[in-house]
Image (cartoon, coloured by chain):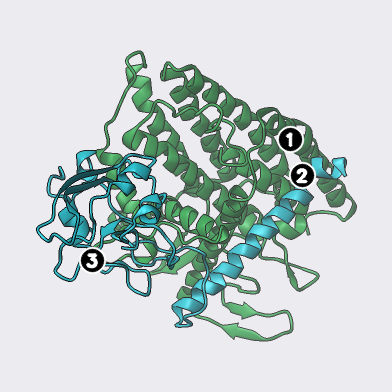
Chain colours: A cyan, B green
């Protein structure tokens, strides 16, 4: 066996045979696809920005603040999420709510997604179901750390993802994002 | 007027050979990407677009060239200014001129002239090709030395050692072909491969010299300095002889490798795959061994022959790419051992066997 391996030729030919098999099988797939056979495929590639693989409905994506019927945040600034957050990326400033039935309202609610670890603890901790991570938005990026800080207004404006897992609101751009 | 026409014809012959090599080498960058992608269940580079047209990523070689040309051309402070600039040109030049004596077709008869379809008709064409291929390694050695970088120097020396062990095997393995066809002129060798063995097998070098074919292809891949014989480059150990190069000079080294691939493929075609010969196609048309004949006009025959040459070269390049994307790199000592203890003695054996066969069965019939 060792002598055969040192002879190289047999091993080389078997290796070339394997890759050639892949080549011709995939080439056949590509040709059939270009001839209009939609289910034929020569590659496992998903061409990302145009094609996307389906997201799981459980996927944790960019946070959003749930609105009341009048459009104000459902959040009562109880600080549960801020306390439980292992990355300490949530910053809340509480204020009095004009309605005496409701305890408080956040004057500021900032999430630094540059720090966020997407553990979902804030969603679990919230007693009012006021914060969710179901927007389907994953592609947020910035040239600066400050550009990763999302404020209350931005988070309030986001919609949950559609049934296909695609975001229904555009990727928000923080007002102070640097180019 | 006649002199002018002669000049034009000579220019056309050179231009065809030259443009064939240059364009094939440029296209090989695309072929390499796409073929490796398809072998590995991928799609390959397809994003370069002009006005929204992608055309299977065929614009990527153009994008590459633009990128290479607009990049910073950096020269290390202690590098030899002149030799550092000279090396990539030497590397590419000898690869390009090596193709000159490879015939891409039979004689074309037009307007009372006989035009040999070959850039230069040399009766020592084979020796010329090998001389030029061997000189190509000077570019690599100069690059390694003039960069003032130890890794580059190591790469250059490895290239020289690999080249010697490969060239010896190449030279010895083609001796069998030369003995069989009795000529050093590549055009004569190709013509000799048009004959038929037992009346139906085309007498290609592959049939008459199978051992030499295997040895030549192996040593030829080694001579191109590409994986699995890319010890001079060895991007994961010593980055290689072009470690200090950037911009288009680096691009020229890449190009030189692809040009050499084309030349080796052209040589393999000419020596072992019948060159421009189409099986059973003579000067007057097809004459099949079962007696049927099909007369064809002269121009169509010539076109078929040139097409056959291009097709065969493409097939050999496909095979070389297949090997390049299948095998891992030989260790330096393994490559040396394969060259000196494997290929070289076997090619000597091939010479002896060929001599024996020619002696016993007489002549080169």
Residue under mark 1: which chain is it in? B
Q: Which residue lies at the image location 51% right of the left edge and 36% below the top edge?
A: B132
Q: Which residue lies at the image location 13% right of the left edge and 59% below the top edge?
A: A100
**Residue matched to label 2:** A8
Q: Contact, CB < 8 Å: mark 2 with mark 1?
A: yes
Measured as percent of width and height from the top left, residue B219 is found at 66, 41
Is label 2 or label 1 in front?
A: 2
- Please identify the quarter of the rendering in which residue B365 is found: bottom right
**Label 1 neighbour load within 10 Å: few <14, some 14-19, many 20+:** many
**Secondary element type, mark 3:** loop
Mark sitting on residue B338: 1
Count of numbered tags: 3
Measured as percent of width and height from the top left, residue A54 is found at 43, 68
Which of the two labelled residues, at mark 3 and mark 2, occupies the earlier sequence position?
2
Residue A173: tell me if it is visible. Answer: no
For residue A159, above or below residue B78? below
Q: Residue furthest left?
A: A98
Horizontal side of residue B358 vs A67, given as left or right:
right
Cα distance between the residues tagged 3 and 2: 59 Å
Measured as percent of width and height from the top left, residue B276 is found at 56, 63
Is label 3 or label 2 in front?
A: 3
Cα distance between the residues tagged 3 and 1: 63 Å
- Please identify the quarter of the rendering in which residue A1 is found: top right
């Amino acid at each position: 066996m060792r002598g055969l391996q040192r002879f190289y030729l047999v091993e080389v030919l078997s290796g070339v045979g394997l890759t050639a098999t892949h080549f011709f099988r995939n080439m056949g797939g590509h040709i059939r696809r270009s001839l209009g056979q939609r289910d034929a495929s020569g590659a496992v590639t998903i061409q990302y920005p145009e094609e996307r693989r389906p997201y799981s409905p459980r996927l944790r994506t960019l946070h959003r603040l749930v609105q009341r019927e009048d459009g104000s945040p459902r959040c009562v600034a109880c600080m549960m999420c801020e306390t439980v957050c292992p990355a300490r990326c949530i910053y809340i400033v509480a204020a009095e709510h004009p309605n005496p039935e409701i305890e408080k309202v956040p004057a500021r609610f900032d999430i630094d997604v540059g720090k966020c670890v997407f553990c979902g603890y804030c969603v679990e901790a919230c007693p009012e179901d006021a914060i969710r991570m179901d927007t389907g938005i994953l592609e947020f990026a910035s040239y600066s750390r400050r550009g990763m800080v999302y404020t209350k207004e931005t988070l309030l404006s986001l919609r949950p993802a559609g049934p296909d897992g695609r975001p229904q609101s555009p990727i928000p751009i923080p007002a102070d994002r640097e180019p | 007027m006649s002199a002018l026409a002669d000049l034009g014809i000579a220019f056309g012959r050179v231009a065809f050979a030259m443009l064939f090599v240059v364009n094939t080498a440029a296209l090989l960058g695309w072929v390499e990407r796409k073929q490796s992608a398809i072998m590995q269940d991928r799609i390959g580079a397809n994003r370069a677009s002009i006005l929204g047209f992608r055309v299977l990523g065929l614009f990527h070689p153009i994008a590459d060239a633009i990128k290479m040309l607009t990049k910073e051309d950096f020269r290390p402070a202690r590098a030899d200014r002149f030799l550092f600039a000279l090396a990539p040109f030497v590397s590419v030049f000898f690869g390009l001129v090596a193709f000159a004596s490879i015939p891409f077709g039979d004689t074309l008869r037009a307007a009372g002239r006989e035009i040999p379809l070959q850039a230069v008709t040399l009766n020592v064409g084979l020796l010329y090709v090998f001389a030029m291929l061997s000189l190509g390694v000077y570019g690599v050695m100069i690059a390694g030395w003039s960069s003032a970088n130890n890794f580059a120097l190591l790469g250059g020396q490895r290239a020289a050692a690999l080249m010697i062990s490969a060239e010896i095997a190449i030279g010895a393995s083609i001796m069998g072909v030369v003995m069989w066809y009795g000529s050093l002129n590549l055009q004569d060798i190709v013509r000799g491969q048009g004959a038929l063995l037992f009346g139906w097998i085309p007498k290609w070098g592959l049939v008459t010299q199978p051992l030499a074919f295997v040895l030549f292809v192996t040593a030829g891949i080694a001579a191109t300095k590409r994986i699995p014989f890319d010890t001079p480059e060895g991007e994961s150990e010593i980055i290689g002889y072009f470690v200090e190069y950037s911009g288009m000079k680096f691009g020229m080294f890449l190009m030189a490798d692809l040009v050499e691939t084309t030349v080796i493929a052209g040589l393999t075609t000419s020596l072992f795959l019948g060159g421009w010969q189409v099986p059973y196609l003579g000067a007057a048309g097809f004459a099949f061994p079962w007696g049927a004949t099909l007369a064809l006009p002269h121009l169509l025959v010539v076109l078929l022959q040139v097409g056959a040459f291009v097709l065969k070269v493409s097939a050999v390049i496909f095979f070389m790419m297949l090997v390049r994307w299948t095998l891992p790199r030989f260790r330096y000592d393994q490559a040396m051992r394969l060259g000196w203890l494997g290929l070289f003695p076997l090619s000597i054996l091939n010479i002896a066997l060929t001599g024996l066969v020619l002696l016993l069965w007489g002549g080169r019939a």
